[in-house]
Each structure stands twice: as C-alpha cells, then as structure tokens.
Amino acid sequence: MSDTAHAGTDGGHDHSPTGWRRWAYSTNHKDIGTLYLAIAVIAAVVGGAMSAMIRLELTQPGIQFIEDFQFYNMLVTAHGFVMVFFVVMPALIGGFGNWFVPLMIGTPDMAFPRMNNVSFWLLAAALVLLVASTFIAGGVGTGWTVYPPLSNADFHPGMAVDFGILSLHLAGASSILGAINLITTILNMRAPGMTLHRMPLFVWAMLITAFLLLMAIPVLAGALTMLLTDRNFGTAFFSPEGGGDPIFWQHLFWFFGHPEVYIMVIPAFGVISHIISTFSKKPIFGYLGMAYAMSAIGFVGFIVWAHHMYTVGFNVETRSYFVIATMVIAVPTGVKIFSWLATMWGGSIDFKTPMLYAMGFIFLFVAGGVTGITLANAGVDQAFHDTYFVVAHFHYVLSVATVFAIYGGIYYWLGKMSGRQYSEVQGRWQFWITFIGVNVLFFPQHFLGMAGMPRRIPDYPDAYAGWNMVSSIGGLITMLGAFMFLWILYRTLTAGAPAEDNPWGEGATTLEWTVPSPAPFHTHEVLPDTSDLQAAE
Amino acid sequence: MSNEAAHRTARASRQGKSTPRRTKLTAYALVGLIGGMGALVATAQPMYRAFCQVTGFGGTTQVADEAKLAALIIPVEDEAAKAARYVTVRFDANTNAKLPWHFRPVQRELRVRIGEQVLAHFEATNISDKTIVGTATFNVTPYKTATYFNKIDCFCFTEQVLHPGQTAQMPVIFYVDPEMLKDINTKNETAITLSYTFFADTDQSAAKKADWDQSAAKEADRDQGEARQAEAERRAENSPANRAEING
C-alpha cells in the first residue's frame, strides 16, 4: 500500500507495486477488478462442479451416487449461494464495475480506493466461510432461501447454518462498501461534460445496481441476524412457540431477494447495451428510455416481493396487487428489449463473439421473461410453485442470460484488460456450444415442471425420466462450453495476439477505448478529451 | 460543480490527501440511507405483528374488547343478523412433536349463529413425567374470515402449565362478527376452522415455579383451573351463546 501511495506522491506514474503486495494491498481499481473477476472464475468452477453433481444424480430415476440426501440438499444450497453471491455479483459489479466505471467516466480511480480493497477481501473471507460450511455438520441444506423452520436449531443443529449466515453477512458488507464506492464515484467524479444524461449505459446500470444493493442488503442482514439469534440466543422471531412467525422470514428474505435478482441482471443490461451498440455501429436506440427503464425496473423491484409467496395464503386482493405490480415490470423490460432490437435494426452488424453472446442474451432473457409472466399469475403459480418450471424460469434469466452477459463482457473487454485478443474462431465455437448446451439443459425443465416434478429432490418418479436425461446431456454440453472458455482464457492470456487500443472500430465510442491496451496501471491522470461531450453542452 | 476539482478526487485520495467535501457528503448520505433501511428492518418485527393483528393477515383472529362487545349489540339488531345466518365452526387441535401432550377438541364442530357468543372446549393431557409449560398458536381458515372471528377469552392468551398426567379443560369464548355477511369475499362462507397448535413454551420458568412446591402448586393449579373453567362457563351462560347447538 505504501508503494502505491508513494508512487502517487513521487509523481512516478510508471511505478507500480509488484509481487503479492500488488494484489493483497491493492488500491488500484483495475487490479481489484481483476481480483474480483478471478474470484468469480474460481467460484464458477466450484459452483459449476456442484451443478454437475446435481445434474448427474438426476440423469436417471433412483439414486445414482448421492446416497446422503442432506449432501444433496447442501449441494443445491451451496450451488445457489456460490453462483449468486460469488460468481454473478463479483463478475458484473466488482469485476466489470471496478474496471470500467472509472475508465468510462474518465477518472483515475474509485472515490475510496482503500475501501475498495476492503470490499474485495471481505468477499474472499465470505467465500472461505461458505466453503467451510459445506464441511461442517452436513452443511447448509436449507436452499438458498434459508426458510425457517428448516434453518432453525431443531432441523439444522450444527454450526453449518451459522457459518452460512456469517458468510452472507460478510458478502453483504462487501457489497455495501462496494456500492458506496460506486455511487460516490459516479456522482462526483465524471469528466467535464459528462452529465448524468450523457454517461454510458453501463455506468447507469452500475449506479442503479448500487442503490438497489444499499437498500436491499441491510434487510437481508437484519433478517439473518434475527435468524442467528433465533438459532443461538433463544429469541423467537421466526418460531411460533415463542410468538414468532416463519412467514415473517419469507417477507424479509424476499424483500431482499427480489431486488437481488435485478442486482444481478441490471449490470448485464448495461454490458449488453454497449456490445449491441458497438457491433451494430450505431448509438444505442432510445438512450434516455434505456436509462430510465433500468431505474423503473429497480424501483418496481422493491414492491413485488410477495410474488414469491403466493402459496402462503394471501387474500385475493393482496394477490391481485402483486400479480399486477409484477406484470408492470414487463413494460420497462419491453422498452429495453425493443430498444436493443431497434439499435440493431438497419445497423451494419458485425457478428463477433461478444455480439453473438449479446443476441443470445436477448433471446434467452425474453424466453425467461415470458415464463416469468406466466409465473406472475397467482393462480398459475398455485400449480407451478416449487416445481422445475420455476427452476427453468430463473435459470433462463440468471444462469443463462446473465452468464451470457458475463461471457460476452469478458470477450468484449478481454483485449482492453489483458492486452491480448482471443481467437475469434474459438470464441464462436464456444458460443454455439454453450448456446445449444444451455437450451438443451434448461428447456426440458419447463416440461418437467408442467408435469409436476418438484424442485430440490434427488430422486423422482419414472415418468420424468426422459426429459431429465435430455437435460443432463445438455448439462454436459454446457460444461464442455465452460471448459472451452477456460481454455480460451488461458490461451489468450498466455499466447493471444496483441490487442489494438480499439479492436472494435468506429462502433466503440466509450472512453475505455481511448486508453492503450492493456490499460496502463494509471489511466486518465490527465482529463480525457471529452470535447465532443462539452461541445454538446 | 467543478468537474476538474472532482476529477482530482481519486488522485488526491490515492495520494493520501483529504477527500473533497462533496465526495464525503455523498458517502455520508449513503450511510444515512443504509441506516434508514437498517432502522426499518430493526423495527420490522413489531410492525409485522401489528399489521397481522389489524388486518387478520395469515388468519390472525381478533381479540374482542369491551368496546367491541358493546358495539356488537347493534349489529345483532340489523338485517343481516335477523336473517339468522349460521356458520359451522370446526375445531382443530395439533401438538408439536416436542411437546408430550395429548391435545384434542372436546367437540368436533359447532353450528354457530353469527353474532352470538359461543363457548367451546379443548382438552389437554400431559403424558410425560415432567411439569411442562405449553403455549398455543392459533389461526382460522379461510384466512379471509379472520378479521371477523373474535375471541373474548381463550386459553391461548396465556401460557398453560400441566403437571405429569394432569388433564385440563381449556375453554375458548368467541363470536363471529355479523360484518362478515357484508363483505363480498366472506358472505358466502359456510364453515370456519379454528385451529390451535400447542408448543412447549421456550420459557419453562413457570414449570419450575410449579414444581418448587409441587403438592401445593398442584392443588392451587387445579383450583385455579376449575375456577377458570367455572368463570368461562359463567360468562358463556350469561351470554346468548349457549343456545348454540352442539352437533359433534
């Protein structure tokens, strides 16, 4: 850390710390962004291995190799936690957010660089606690929703759930610090002429996401604290014998949990907007509409939480409200989808790998959105609640669409981050393998859900055998795509062709393409040229 | 704002210089927002409880106070009540697996005239060799009738102590509010299920107290139990509710 500080005061901009100190003590937004991306890749391997075990167990009816059902429950739970908190969020918010928000708004670093370092290491500690919980007392077998009474001391008497709770506390603290940093940076440190209404859509997405984090995470933290005291200190927030109510947990959890899904997908919207615009060689269609559509999605996301709880016995008026409020989200989402299509319309489209992923994102997000509208109906949800239809729905929007945005974003920015360009042929192969794989994996799960197959079970009646086999084959294809991605990443970093400062040509107009590739340790030490923005003023 | 000044922020903070005032203000405002959400979640539990009691959410029944009982006289006079609508009230008793009690309703169901006060009994037996404090949770289904289901007195309002082998009658006095017939969602309901689940109370101090002088406590408890029952029966007899027919 002292190295970095001295580098600044000495004015020696070329000097940068080396060795383990560079990473452990880092206050540099690019290095911290790289650390976030690295932890996301590591966690993705862990979470992916868990999903592979789940899918292999479900290949055929009967028990294949997981004989301890608590172990299966633990896999389902840990897979969810790892993917949500340690893959999607670090990659999109900590990784791309740290790397490209300062570059895009033309500032040298984040507002609080040292706090940025704390954010990352809190997340690393959280991952260690979560992994530790899987080895203790059978692990956390509650599902990622941690509903009591299953999560209370009667049904999970060991320390595993406590480890899980503390892990989420740390991950939440990390997210909150990161969100403060992002908002403060975006609001105060933009280059001259870059008004809020002129900043890139990815920066808009990060701003909205950070506000969602600030408002949702404290609710999760409060709920987890209540659960922790219920388990260890004899309170009864969620246990009826002491005057509590398990449904109260569900309200608190989903008040956090629904905004959480937008926390994951809004940064993806930002990435996709840039890719579509770059490779269509057109400015994004309806820029302001896009920005305010994300704001509207974020706002409405806070008042629809009970659509996860239709079966707890609300009266018909309550359910009507939540059905209507949920469906309203389709309007700003539609604004986004059609604006992307309008951006491509008449554009000179270059089908590079990031663009393939962006178009795949639109296709899959619409597919997942349509099943979301189906599930938004309280009546339909009585039948579909806790079936594989729900699993198919949220994997289409999260595991497929959002992960497509991560893949696309890495291909899009890898040259800028590493200075080396991936092989286009390999990238396209990897896209098509993954695209086919995820659809073979998740589309049949709609049929399983409509046929009534419940979630979170290691065994099932023979009637569900056929589509489960298909789904598992899709899982293997997807995994092949993931391995291929790791190989491409390795090949690019070690032997990729040198990347140009702007490999994408005239379509790439944001400020990160004005700095060299790889982006030097310090960028925008002098104000970037924003004369076009200022001229517009 | 001065953009150039703002632009220097990151450089300044990296060099250990003080953070500009505007940046600090933003950060403080954001910490305030987090504090606000924290305050909301910290007060969520009492707010949720109040919300359930007011709205009957999740089948939370109402507790009738004096004012409510006085007001009840008027609805009984009005049209809906004159139609002498009846509703079947079914009784359901559950025991948590960790509580070694037998708990059952004395009557399976009652046909109740809407607006009349009714006395029903449950019976609990402690089948263990320890004195145990139990507490009962309650709700009614359909949930939407909960706002019209009023309890005047109930064994579920207080904790119950049972000595080893002791059996106790547990009374509940309730009425169904005639307002139910004016609500478009509930006016066609013909049956309401009143359900209880007995749990071992997390606070077992009352059991220790009872054991401390067991013989005296036993005596007192029985007297008290009988007195409570007699009191409940007296109240029920004084009300028009004892005209309710017992079907079960």
Image: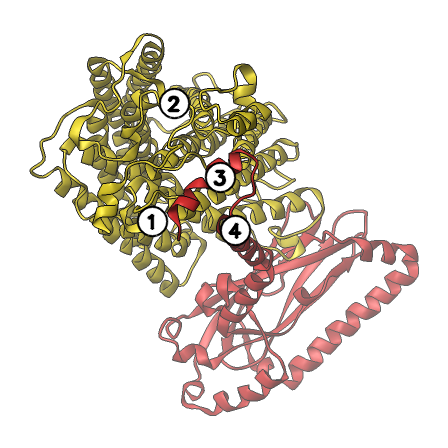
Q: Position of residue A244 (x, y in %)?
A: 61, 55
Q: Chain of mark 1?
A: A
Identify which amino acid the numbered label 3 is placed on: Gly
- Chain B shade: red
Secondary structure, mark 1, is helix
In yellow, which chain?
A
Q: Is residue A458 above or below residue B102?
A: above
Q: For the residues carrying marks 1 and 2, which lies nearer the camera in this image?
A: 2
Specify few, some or many for label 3: CA neighbours under 10 Å numbering under 14, 14-19, or 20 or more: many
Q: Is residue A465 left or right of residue B205?
A: left
Query: How far is the residue under mark 4 from the one under mark 3?
Result: 20 Å
Query: How far is the residue under mark 2 from the one under mark 3?
Result: 23 Å
Secondary structure, mark 2, is loop
Q: Which image quadrant is residue B4 in? A: top left
Q: Is residue A32 left or right of residue B131?
A: left
Q: Which numbered disc covers residue A389?
A: none
Q: Which residue is mark 2?
A: A520
Q: For the residues carrying marks 2 and 3, which lies nearer the camera in this image?
A: 2
Specify few, some or many for label 2: CA neighbours under 10 Å numbering under 14, 14-19, or 20 or more: some
Q: Position of residue A272 (x, y in %)?
A: 26, 35
Q: Nearer the viewer, residue A441 or A344?
A: A344
Q: Which numbered disc covers residue A178?
A: 3
